[in-house]
Image (cartoon, rainbow, N blue to C red):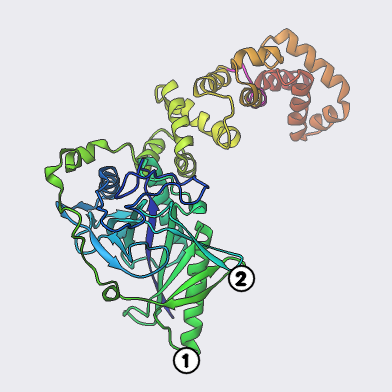
Amino acid sequence: MYRPTIGLEIHAELSTRTKMFCDSANNPDETRPNVNICPVCTAHPGTLPVINLAAVRHILRVGTAIGGTPADFSEFDRKSYFYPDIPKGYQISQYEHPLIVGGELSGVAITRVHLEEDTARSLHVEGKSLVDFNRAGIPLMELVTEPVISDAETAGKFARELQLLLRTLGASEANMEKGEMRVEANVSVSSNKDFGTKVEVKNLNSFRSVERAIAFEIRRQTALIEGGGEVVQETRGWNETKQETFHQRFKEGSADYRYFPEPDLPKLFLSEIPELSREAIRTSLPELPWERRARYAALGLKANDAAFITASVERGAFFDSVVREFDGKRKPVALAANYFISDLAVDPGKATPTSFAKLIHLFISQMLSSRGTKDTLLVLVEQGGDPEAIAKERGLIQIHDSTALTAVVDTVLAREEKAVLEYKGGKQTALQYLVGKAMKESGGAGNPNMLHKLIKEKLD
């Protein structure tokens, strides 16, 4: 029996106005190459970097949210390696003194969270290698977990929760398909309590790829060992088409990077910077995803529903506005959640939290049936407006008048002789069939409870 051990290294581009060490624009949506550049981020001789305070604050907020320990002293280091996308021949990162140590997210222990600059982007077109420096120097968060994950599903769950946290904090959009969040998995298998040989898997640009690559690598290493082979420490990529990992290079160790303190940047004594104090960072945090899920559960939402609404910052913001319309009352909030998830959450269109809440009030007051509520909501999403006016215009307001409903019942019973006989013969489902026909006869506006009562009285 082989025991998998997985640790994750996750990079996320931070949402700041400018780059990490210069005033070039940080614009991940720029499509023109080499326009957001300057002598600093393209490493012209004699230039000096300046620390982006907003990027440091983002890291401290992330670290505080996950219960990590913010540093009082921190510094940046030079990490030397030579690729065409590293203009200086080294990357400014952090090694001995990261901004955050420890913490926990989604049940996974965190080793550290630190700050560094992103590399440029290499492109290979028609036999030529090109470099776009727009991305060079963008502030990059690196979060490293402890090697405590034991399966692919847990790794995927962790990465999704981190993305949600980053978006909740406004630290990063973390779109994996745009490369704004990149996941690397360190995977090993062992037949005893010792760690196996670690293999790093890169190029994971979706949560599904993270899970599939880890699962594949566990199978590959297990089969290799069982076949008498030996796992080597290496970096592997993920081939989405073949659904398998492949060798890229043999893994460097930390000594290969020749880390040493960055001489062109000052040391950071965070307690001396008021806006970066622990109290200032703590009080700046919004409601966190797990806090929101707990609040929804206290309002009566099922765990899956609370998780679904919380999983999107936009969905959560819309639904919270609806909750405020109901003053947090459990029954209407739980009812609103049902309609929201089944009919509105994908795209609320022109519906607003206020109009949606008013629609739920119409259902609770029995002015609208369930069918009438759904039909009104469809118009509300497409056109907007007042739900009561929409329902009246389309004849969806429920009929409670017994005289009018009796006429509907008489018409249906006269037409549905077979169902009437079946009911009188003991077939209880025939009663619901007749109620359905009566609802249709009333244009969906008949009160189903009154129709049920009137039909039963007539037939019994």
Is residue 209 found inside the magenta-colored segment of the image? no
Relative horizontal placement of residue 152, taking residue 104 as reference (left or right): right
Q: How many marks?
A: 2
**Residue 61 at x, y percent in the picture:** 27, 44
Residue at point 24% right, 48% down? 50
The outermost residue toward the front is: 45
Q: Tag 1, which secondary structure?
A: loop
Label ID, residue 166: none
**Residue of label 1:** 228
Amino acid type, label 1: Gly
Q: Is residue 460 visible?
A: no
Image quarter of residue 199: bottom left
Amino acid type, label 2: Lys
**Residue stretch rendered in magenta on the structure:** 366-376
The outermost residue toward the left is: 272
Q: Is residue 259 visible?
A: yes
Q: Earlier in the sequence, mark 1 or mark 2?
A: 1
Quarter of the picture containing the N terminus is bottom left
Q: Is residue 162 above or below residue 420?
A: below
Image quarter of residue 274: top left
Question: Which mark lies nearer to you, 1 or 2?
Answer: 2
Principal secondary structure, stretch drawn in magenta = helix
Q: CA distance from mark 1 to mark 2?
A: 25 Å
Label ID, residue 242: 2
The outermost residue toward the bottom is: 228
Quarter of the picture containing the C terminus is top right
Q: Is residue 265 above or below residue 245?
A: above
Residue at point 47% right, 91% down? 228
